Amino acid sequence: MAVLGRNDINSVEDCTCKDIYIKEWGGSVSIGPMTVSERLKFEAEQKQLEKDGSDEEIAKLHMYGTLVSSVKDSNGKPLYDEETILEMGNRNIHAVTTLYRACLDINFISPDIVKGLKKNLEETT
């Protein structure tokens, strides 16, 4: 097996999407993993909110931030942005929760990670 160089790594399309069937919507939604940059931004925003924000703001960031970075169109590009994702607030909780859990899974985000962020922050302040 060949050792990959920087150009080899950077030219590979590694953000493959998968479709998640949402029964309440009668169709599938495409999701894909966050990029490293999206994940770092997401975690930085989460840490900042844990310092200054309310539990509700933290929960919104976690759900909406994960969905913004993970729900994709047919070309693998984000389907929502930070403003339009708020439309999800008017959708069926079962459908959105199914989608959210799939996005957590594809990004290796678990409730333990979220709890760990808060615990680590409390220990450093």
Image: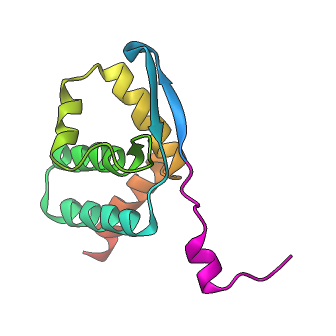
Q: Is residue 8 left or right of residue 77?
A: right
Q: Quadrant of the N terminus?
A: bottom right
Let me know if residue 106 is in the magenta part. Answer: no
Residue 23 position by quadrant: top left
| Of 3 and 48, the residue lying toward us | 3
What's the residue at 29%, 50% (across, down)?
A: 65
Q: In this rendering, is residue 91 above or below 65?
A: above
Residue 87: percent from left, percent from top: 18, 32
Q: Quadrant of the C terminus?
A: bottom left
What's the residue at 39%, 41% (across, down)?
A: 73
Q: Is residue 32 left or right of residue 68?
A: right
Residue 48 position by quadrant: bottom left
**Magenta segment, principal secondary structure?**
loop
Residue 13: percent from left, percent from top: 57, 62
Q: Which residues are magenta?
A: 1-16
Residue 37: percent from left, percent from top: 38, 69
| Of 10 and 101, the residue lying toward us | 10
What's the residue at 37%, 16% (across, down)?
A: 25
Q: In this rendering, is residue 43 above or below 112?
A: below
What's the residue at 41%, 47% (across, down)?
A: 70
Let me know if residue 4 is in the magenta part. Answer: yes
